Image: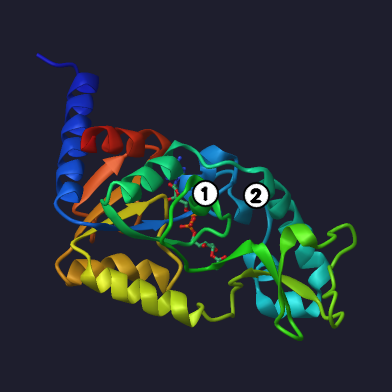
Amino acid sequence: MFSQEEGQELVFRKNIKEAAERIRNTKAVVLTGSGISVASGIMPFRGKGGLWEKYDPEEMASIHTFRRNPRAAWVMHKEIYDVVKEALPNPAHLSLARMEAMGYISSIITQNVDGLHQKAGSKTVIEFHGNIIKLICLDCSKLYPAVEIDLGSLPPLCPACKGVLKPDAVFFGEPIPREALDRSQEEVQQCQVMLVVGTSAVVEPVASLPRLAKNRGADIIEINPQPSQLTSSVTTLFLQGKAEEVLPKVLEELN
Ligand code: OAD
């Protein structure tokens, strides 16, 4: 007889094998959220220790508040940027990059603004919510790599026109970049397997992508230490665990 723990381990290993089997037969589309970057030292938005426990999203990540008082909003964004610029990809990002190189992944749609998929070597990354590695001028729309801008006095100003610079991430009240939206929908409509990693899937329109894939007949494989609102509705196979532990196991199985 197996103990309860041994039984759970067996089910987990069976699920890893099954996930690898489904991915092996096709090219998966991956959707990632902030949970995948937790092991890189970047805090998620929701839940215990999340950013929205410390800051009010309406206050700090709304374009309307930003325009009214960019200095106040920049205090939070500078804090995030200082962490992100030093952060390194973790085994979850690296496993996905390897899986793409092996031909098992067609694209990664990410809600993250940290650039860690690219740092890990992933090539086809669709940044659904933009990124904070670049800054955009609210007046002339010129883009600058954040490393080139002095963040010593806030808000930073555009070297060309002295307009206020904003992280090039999507704030509440701003539209999703058209190209990211179109490419994501195209990818999702064509995929047979969607791998959903480390997202609570509560922010629209990105949260609807797994449902769209499911309605087109795709399998949804979800990796998260906690069930999300997708788990009991659209998820086909739930791999309960941390992305940085589960994805290397899936990769090992594919190898
Ligand atoms: P959330 O903070 O809402 O969700 C993070 C998810 O990651 C949760 O479901 C956690 O259980 C899970 N998680 C935590 N640690 C993990 C780990 N080690 N491995 C895997 N999963 C883990 O973050 P998002 O879903 O990314 O939007 O949030 C979506 C959007 O809400 C963000 O893009 C941002 C935010 O408001 C904007 O700013 C427009």
> Image point 78% across, 61% down: which residue?
148
For label 1, the SS is: loop
Q: Between residues 66 and 244, which one lies in front from this camera angle?
A: 244
Q: Disc 2 marks which amino acid?
A: Val
Whichever of labels 2 and 1 marks the residue nearer the N terminus, that label is: 1
> CA–CA distance between discs 2 and 1?
20 Å
- Residue 202 is drawn in which quadrant? bottom left
Q: Pointer 1: what residue?
A: 47
Task: Report whether 57 appears left or right of 126.
Answer: right
The image's mark for residue 84 is 2
Residue 122 placement (x, y as % from top left): 43, 52
Residue 114 placement (x, y as % from top left): 58, 55
* Residue 181 vertical position relative to residue 76 in the rendered view, above or below: below
* Residue 252 vertical position relative to residue 210 in the rendered view, above or below: above
Q: Disc 1 marks which amino acid?
A: Gly
Q: Are marks 2 and 1 in contact (CB under 8 Å)?
A: no
Task: Report whether 221 appears left or right of 25.
Answer: right
Q: State the quadrant of the C terminus.
A: top left
Q: Residue furthest bottom?
A: 140
> Image point 14% across, 67% down: which residue?
217
Q: Residue furthest left?
A: 1
> Image point 58% across, 80% down: which residue?
174
